[in-house]
Image (cartoon, rainbow, N blue to C red):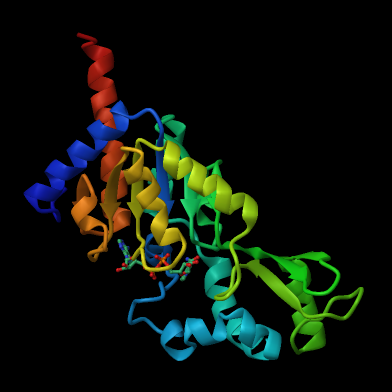
Amino acid sequence: MNTLEPIERENIKKTARLLLNSEFAIVLTGAGISTESGIPDFRGESGIWKKYKPKIYGSIQSFLNDPSKFWKMAEEIAPTLFNAEPNPGHYAIADLEKENIIKAVITQNIDELHQKAGTVIVYEVHGNINRFTCMGCRASYTKEQILRKIKKEKSSPGCSFCGAPLKPSVVLFGESLPNFEKYMSIDLAKKADIMLIAGSSLTVAPICDLPLYTLREGGNLIIVNDETTYLDDRAEIVINNKTGVVLPLIVQEVRSIKAKQVSDPT
Ligand code: NAD
């Protein structure tokens, strides 16, 4: 724990204790948990989103007007997204699930790194980059099929059945969230006695409101993010540091408390 301030070390211990005493802890993650896997978030200085403004290139309106613009951006982003591997933050969350502490992960990310790290119960409220759907007949395509199509057709891929544009199954700006994930995440947020928020600026609606359901029902928030958020004042614990550093230390602390409980059950 050398790179951490004493207060952060104390907060990690406090988080572990709160998690161990919880009955229904859930996790909410955002783009920040994947930056240490090399995928830039929306707000960082690094590259891609500075060139392609997400609200322009990532909006359903521009996609409908001209899908080729979107696919041009996708060509640049796809290798980073497809080749990324989970980092210690993702593995720590998977470990907390294995320890039966975390009951579900709600993620705004589309990169599937939680599942790659081994987490089983993941609600992807903004969809997933590895599946594609036809805007016309709703036929679905895998990533491999799309890559093959792009290579062959050398333009925005069209549906093999009806010719309509194909779109990744991710929620673009201006689109609604998928119903099942939307209602499940609200339900989970209400049920949670702890919501651990990791790597989210809590600025993208409507997900930024989820923690309010937890607070309203008497649950606690724990925020791990390298900058402040609008809910810091209402959180039980805030740790402004890297998720890839803090989350594994929380798991370490949980395991050490559990081990002590086994060796000295009094
Ligand atoms: P965001 O970009 O608005 O915020 C990320 C937050 O994480 C920022 O506050 C940033 O300071 C912090 N952060 C960055 N790296 C961190 C680290 N290693 N440790 C701790 N904190 C770190 O992201 P958001 O809140 O998820 O909302 C933006 C939208 O971006 C979401 O809808 C999401 O779908 C989309 N998005 C997803 C990905 C992905 O799938 N990996 C990448 C970019 C954007």
Q: Quadrant of the C terminus?
A: top left
| Residue 218 falls in image quadrant | top left
Viewer-side residue, 216 vs 157? 216
Q: Is residue 107 above or below residue 171?
A: above
Residue 93 lies, in percent from the top left, at 41, 44
Residue 66 makes an appearance in the image: no
Residue 142 lies, in percent from the top left, at 75, 64
Residue 230 makes an appearance in the image: yes
Residue at 45% in and 59% down:
207
Residue at 29% in and 46% down:
221
Residue 237 lies, in percent from the top left, at 20, 47
Q: Decide if residue 235 is on the left or right side of residue 25.
A: left
Residue 154 lies, in percent from the top left, at 76, 89
| Residue 174 falls in image quadrant | bottom right
Viewer-side residue, 55 vs 119? 55
What is the residue that sits farthest to the front in this orientation?
Answer: 216
Viewer-side residue, 146 vs 16? 16
Ligand 1 in which quarter: bottom left
Q: Is residue 133 above or below residue 117?
A: below
Residue at 56% in and 45% down:
184
Q: Decide if residue 85 is on the left or right side of residue 237.
A: right
What is the residue that sits farthest to the right in this orientation?
Answer: 161
